[in-house]
Amino acid sequence: MADKKPKRRVIHPWPLRLTHWLNALAIVMMIGSGWQIYDASPLFGFTFPRLITIGQWLGAAIAWHLAFMWLLVANGLVYFIWSAASGHFGKFFPLTPRALWRDLSAALTFRMTHEAGVYNAVQKLLYLGVLFAGVVIVISGLAIWKPVQLWFFCDLCGGYVIARYVHFFAMAAIAGFLAVHVLLVAIVPKVLPPMITGGRIGP
Amino acid sequence: MRNINRRSMLLRAMAMGALSTLPACDYENPADPDLADKFLHAMSTWNDRVQEALFNPHTLAPTFRADQITMPPRFNAFYDISQVLVVDPATFRLELGGQIQDKSPWSLAALNALPQAAQITRLTCVEGWRVIGEWAGVPLGYFLRRIGADTSCRYVSFICADGYYTSIDMPSALHPQTILALKFLGQPLTPPFGAPVRLRIPTKLGFKNPKSIVQMAVTNIYPGGYWEDQGYNWFSGS
């Protein structure tokens, strides 16, 4: 029997890369059009400048929003099913307060080391948090879209009026994650190519 | 009626003009759709189908207590409240068309003599705000059967005194909470709120609740709507 050569492992398998970039597109389209929809009836004392919104008027913004929600949800379901089936979710655990404290203080003092293919505790928390925000934004979005037919989602969010606030804050959480996420890629640019090509790490 | 129609056409033209001045917007010219418009239109048609499938004729819109009614009520139209048309209730006739056996026009008194139903429900605007109000009037399902409408048709369409027009699907028209409202907050409708008769359909967004209806028709030919033709989703169910 011939000796098996140890295989080099892919950092990001193709289903992860595909769903990541489709999700990136969906998130940008949903947030951009969502800001324009928000502007039609602002919840707070500010509006989003039209320059950074998608759809130049309410009708177009809603059309974009209700078109790309299908990509967001379908792609999200594929991601969750693939992650559960492939064991990808295992990378988020264990997540202990001690590890979180250690990695957070390292990150804040710029002593964080990046180990390819392994999530540190801060990453685990951020990824779990944004996945949770993703679930919340879909449920609150369905509650606003169909408060009568999907009344259970509306009730779950505390009614139609509160559901709009829940939807807004879930957006704010995702936008905040996105800012940190992009900033970290800018600081450690070597992590970007593997998210496109898959990358390889030794045996 | 001729004067009313001419003025309403002018109002519509002004509203369309205001929209078409927006720079580089999607749906800027529905008559000349670009690739993005075609994509959005296809997705909106898909969303119509999903909403038709999702619609449960037995699911009721939430109802509220009298003390939850929004006061003062909020006026909304595609023009300012100072431009509201006043329809003379004495000469008003609701005209009927399409797949209906008895197309005799209805006077306000005749509509008032029909069985009435009241509701305290939420009107949700496509913009995101909502108001709670009390409406009373003739259940549309009862009225459609009374006039011998073919309820196997797909659409019920409405034309308003101010030139506004819209249409709804037949299952939503037959929903028990869909009414031809004659009263608002316990009093006959006032011109800003749709006198003499408006549609109140709490299972759809606000712009699917046409005011000051002068014509109603039952048809299988897609009638569109004032906002729908500019890009709002047609079904717009809640």
Image (tube, coloured by chain):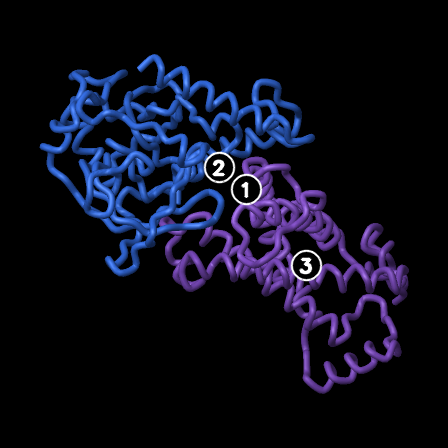
Chain colours: A purple, B blue
Q: Amino acid at mark 2?
A: Asn
Secondary element at tag 2: helix
Marks 1 and 3, how far apart in space? 19 Å
Q: Distance from label 2 to label 1 (Cα)?
A: 8 Å
Asked if residue B88 shows in the view, the reply is yes
Q: Nearer the viewer, residue B68 or B121?
A: B68
Residue position marked by numbered label 3 in the rendering: A175
* Residue B180 horizontal/vertical position (percent): 23, 34
> On the image, which quarter does residue B162 sit in?
top left
Label pair 2/1, CB-CB below 8 angstroms: yes
Three-letter code for the amino acid on which mark 1 is drawn? Leu
Query: What amino acid does circle 3 point to?
Result: Ala
Q: Chain of mark 1?
A: A
Residue drawn at x 40%, y 34% is B82
Residue A66 numbered tag: 1
Q: Which residue is mark 2?
A: B47
